[in-house]
């Protein structure tokens, strides 16, 4: 009887709309969940019944699928360098155990932190995956955990010292240079700090003395207490040489020797003083030290050594390259993040905790670098917000409520008609 069919059709409508309300409720509950993707219930008509001579009669509705909508969420800046957002397609790859199952999982929630072993991880301990780097900063191509804490920057011994200055052309010629009285036997001096193989700092004073028209000599001195076999408090020469200038104040040639033997470190340590591009080597003679009539002055100096440093901060670029900065001012690559992409991301299995797992319907993960192969870029210091639109969810809630109420009227009406039918017997 068609009255009974209408009861079943109304019941299917109640079930479908109640499920839609459950989906809406889940969306609203996750309106502030980082990386959450809103879902919707997709309705489809139920199997129709063929009626002889009257065509087909529908038997109600059903929920065909609960579809997850993977659209881009807005990014919210946090200023925390380990907070990450994906701008475009893709998922972060995390590894660990979830629900008794170990392996790789996938997430859009980029709230990462450093765990107690120094690895980048989710808030519940799953480790972020990428290409680790060795102590020299060379990045491997084997995916693994990414360690940040507990690393350091080894020292680097100074090998080159660069100095750019002007030496006063009309300066008087002082007495022959005396290491025990350098201030009174030189025309100009400058100080610089260099480092040995242990990262120990050595204060070096470089003295320039005029020896004739267009000719100078220079002497680099350190405290003898910092040298192997040296005497503390006694200035000791570790390098020296000569400089020659032409009538236009250009550097023509230079000579140098060095004998730096730092105490306790690898020695002798070769030092090269770069005073510019002499004319004798095909240079301009003006890129380093010059001899003009203006007062002697140091314009620039630098050296390539540094002490040991501990980890200070981290930065991550749009390609997922992780760069660590150390207390000695040095920086190096610590690794590079990878992203996973899927042919059908809406078919991933939702595991809770902002995690997904691959399924046969989603296809296998295609893992690679950010900004390649259709994968999105990474924004550091930002998080992707939920894609739930509260206003839209309220509209869907109202529609589902009205649909539920309307289907309940189908049931009550059919019930009333059946009751009237039963009254005929009486």
Image (cartoon, rainbow, N blue to C red):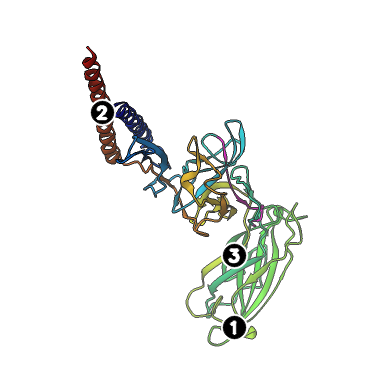
User: Which of pointers 3 and 1 lies earlier in the amino acid sequence?
Assistant: 3
Tell me if residue 386 comes above or below residue 282 in the rendering.
above
The label shown at residue 408 is none
Tell me the distance, in whole angstroms, between the alpha carbons under discs 3 and 1.
32 Å
The one nearer the camera, 94 or 308, is 94
The structure residue drawn at horizontal position 61% and vertical position 45%, both measured from the top left corner, is: 147
Tell me the distance, in whole angstroms, between the alpha carbons under discs 1 and 2.
97 Å
The structure residue drawn at horizontal position 38% and vertical position 33%, both measured from the top left corner, is: 26
Tell me the distance, in whole angstroms, between the alpha carbons under discs 2 and 3.
107 Å
The one nearer the camera, 381 or 56, is 56
Q: Position of residue 280 (x, y in %)?
A: 64, 85
Per the image, label 1 sits on a secondary structure element best described as: loop
Span shown in magenta: 125-138
Tell me if residue 19 comes above or below residue 200 in the rendering.
above
Residue at the bottom extreme of this rendering: 247
Per the image, label 2 sits on a secondary structure element best described as: helix
**Side (left or right) of 169 relative to 49:** right
Judge depth for marks 2 and 3 and give the one in front: 2
Q: Residues within 10 Å of mark 1 (few under 14, many from 20)?
A: some
Q: Which residue is mark 3?
A: 183
Q: Which residue is mark 1?
A: 283
Can residue 83 be seen by looking at this rendering? Answer: no
The label shown at residue 410 is 2
Can residue 334 be seen by looking at this rendering? Answer: yes
Determine which quarter of the picture holds residue 59.
Answer: top left
Contact (Cβ within 8 Å) of mark 3 with mark 1: no
Q: Position of residue 110 (x, y in %)?
A: 47, 44
Q: Position of residue 97 (x, y in %)?
A: 60, 35
User: Which of pointers 2 and 3 lies earlier in the amino acid sequence?
Assistant: 3
């Amino acid at each position: 009887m068609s009255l009974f069919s209408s009861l079943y059709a109304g019941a299917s409508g109640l079930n479908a709309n109640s499920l839609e309300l459950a989906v809406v409720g889940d969306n609203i509950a996750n309106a502030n969940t980082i990386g959450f993707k809103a879902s919707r219930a997709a309705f489809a008509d139920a199997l129709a019944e063929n009626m002889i001579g009257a065509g087909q009669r529908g038997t109600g509705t059903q929920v065909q699928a609960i579809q997850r909508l993977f659209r881009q969420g807005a990014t919210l800046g946090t200023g925390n360098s380990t907070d990450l957002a994906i701008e475009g397609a893709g998922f972060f790859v995390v590894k660990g155990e979830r629900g008794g199952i170990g392996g790789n999982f996938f997430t859009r929630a980029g709230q990462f932190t450093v765990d107690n072993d120094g690895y980048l991880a989710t808030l519940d301990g799953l480790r972020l995956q990428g290409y680790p780097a060795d102590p020299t900063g060379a990045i491997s191509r084997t995916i693994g955990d990414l360690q940040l804490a507990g690393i350091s920057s080894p020292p680097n011994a100074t090998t080159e010292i660069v100095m750019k200055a002007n030496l006063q052309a009309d300066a008087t010629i002082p007495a022959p240079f005396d290491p025990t009285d350098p201030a009174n036997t030189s025309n100009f001096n400058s100080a610089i700090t260099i480092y040995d193989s242990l990262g120990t700092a050595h204060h070096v004073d470089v003295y320039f003395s005029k020896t004739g028209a267009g000719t100078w000599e220079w002497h680099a001195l350190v405290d003898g207490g910092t040298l192997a076999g040296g005497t503390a408090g006694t200035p000791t020469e570790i390098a020296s040489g000569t400089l020659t200038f032409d009538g236009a104040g250009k550097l023509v040639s230079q000579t140098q020797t060095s004998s730096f033997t730092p105490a306790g470190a690898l020695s002798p340590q070769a030092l090269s003083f770069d005073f510019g591009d002499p004319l004798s080597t095909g240079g301009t003679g003006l890129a380093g030290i010059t001899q003009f009539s203006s007062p002697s002055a140091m314009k620039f100096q630098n050296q390539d050594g540094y002490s040991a440093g501990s980890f200070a901060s981290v930065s991550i670029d749009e390609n997922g390259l992780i760069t660590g900065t150390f207390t000695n001012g040095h920086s190096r690559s610590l690794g590079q993040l990878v992203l996973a992409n899927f042919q059908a991301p809406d078919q991933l299995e939702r595991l809770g905790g902002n995690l997904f797992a691959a399924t046969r319907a989603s296809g296998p993960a295609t893992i690679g670098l950010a900004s390649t192969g259709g994968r999105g870029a990474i924004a550091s210091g930002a998080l992707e917000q939920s894609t739930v639109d509260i206003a839209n969810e309220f509209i869907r809630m109202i529609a589902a409520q009205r649909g539920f109420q309307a289907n309940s009227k189908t049931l009550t009406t059919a019930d009333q008609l059946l009751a009237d039918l039963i009254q005929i017997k009486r």
